[in-house]
Each structure stands twice: as C-alpha cells, then as structure tokens.
Image: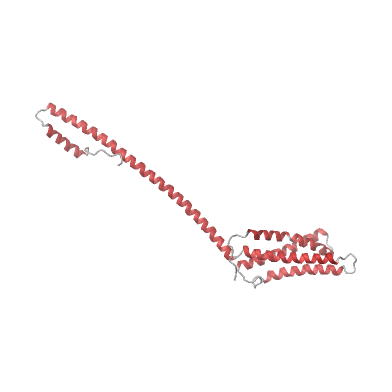
Amino acid sequence: MESRKDPDFPVHRVVFIVVSFLLGLLDMTLLYRAFHDLTQLNNGMSMIISFIIATIANFTALTWGWENGRHLAKRTINKRTVGEFVIWLAIGIMYAVIRAINIINKLGNPELNWMGETIQIVILAISYIGTGVLIQSSAREIWDAECVAFRKARKKFNRLHEDVADASADLHEDIGILKKYNMNYSALEHQKNKIEFAIRKSEKAVMADIVSMTCAKNPMISPVQANKVMEQVLDSAGVNIKEPKDNE
C-alpha cells in the first residue's frame, strides 16, 4: 500500500539535491587523476572535464526524477525516463572504464597501490550511485504532479481568501460609516425638529400677542372666538406641532 503523500513543499529534498551536486566535486577528485593519465591533459583541464561529466550525470538524474514526478510514474524506469536512465548509467560505466583502463596501464608498475585503487573505486561507485538515486527520488517528490497541483490550488485558495478578507474588511468599514451616518442623520433631524418647533412656538406667541392687542382695542371681539380663529390659522399654517422628544 502506497504511503500517503505530504503535499507541503519538501525543502529537505532541495537540500539533498544541492548536497548531491556538491558531491560531484568528490567524483571529480576521484576521477580526474585517472582521466589525466588516460588523456594526457593537464590537471586543470582534467578537473574541469571530470566536473562537467559529473554535473551532466547529476542533471540527467534530476531530469529523470522530474519526468517521473510530473507523470506520476509508479516505476522508477519507464518509457518516459529510459533515455535519462541510459545516459546516467552510461556515464557511470564510463567512470568504471576510465578507472579500469588506468589500472591496466599501471600493471607491472611498482607504484600501483591495489588497496588505494580499490578504495577509490568503491567510494566512487557509492558516491555516483547514491547521489544519482538521491537526486532522482528527491526530484520525483518535488515535482510530484499531485502535490504540485495541490500546492497551486492551496496558493490560489489562500490568495482568494485574502481577497475575501480584504473585501470583508472594506465592507465592515463601509457599514460602520453608514451606521455613523445614520446616527448623525437622526441627530440632525431631531435638531431640525427642535429648531422648527422653537420657530413655530415663537410664531404662536407673536400671534397670541396680536390677538390679545386686537381684543384689547376692539372690545366687541370675543377673545374666545379670536383664539379659535388664531388656532385655525396656526393649524392651516402647520404651526401647531408637538414638541419633539429627546429620544425621537
């Protein structure tokens, strides 16, 4: 049964790949002397060529794992990655051939150190195979199609969530402004009603004074009838209004 995948980005796998590429320096160190003896190139050129070959091998392993992860290949070697695997394997065989030819050329030479050559071959084999497999498996996990799709979807969801949160914050701010506006509007309306009441109260007082003076100068006019006429005039003019309460 396949273990459940971790959709989070595997940072440790990136570290593995970087370290594996740096181990190409070890491959170069173990290979360049034999390459120098075989090609008669100077040490500097032998080191450069050996490092380029090691880097090509690592990039091949990286592409190999990338293809596997991108296409969710269950088998490490499949029709999509057979080319990368063959190149990676061929470079490894080339390493072995170079070391073998170097040893053959040294046969009969008293300086030939079988123990040292054997140790170098073992270390080179472990380093080459180990780094290649580690790069391949790490790249496969990094570019796993399902995990990549999940990370993209999660990133999009988080971005949309942030947009919604921003929109919600703006909406709450607008609601707060509208609430304040409504409160201010109610307060202004209440104040307006108070001012109108004071004006009409003054108008009523003035009318009452006029009626009183008129009745005083004209005794034949009934004060009661004069007050009724005043009330009718005030009602038709909309002056007779109730005093607004503080909670209105």
Furthest-top residue in this view: 217
Q: Is residue 38 visible?
A: no
Residue found at x 68% / y 64%: 135
Left or right of residue 105: residue 11: left
Q: Nearer the viewer, residue 97 or 9?
A: 9
Which quadrant of the figure has residue 183?
Answer: top left
x and y, in percent, of residue 166 in the image: 48, 51
x and y, in percent, of residue 81 in the image: 66, 70
Which quadrant of the figure has residue 242?
Answer: top left
x and y, in percent, of residue 140 in the image: 64, 65
Q: Is residue 95 visible?
A: yes
Decide: is 211 above or below 61.
above
x and y, in percent, of residue 54 in the image: 74, 63
Q: Nearer the viewer, residue 229 or 27?
A: 27
Which quadrant of the figure has residue 180?
Answer: top left
Left or right of residue 26: residue 155: left
Decide: is 138 above or below 171.
below
Say which quadrant the N terminus sits in. Answer: bottom right
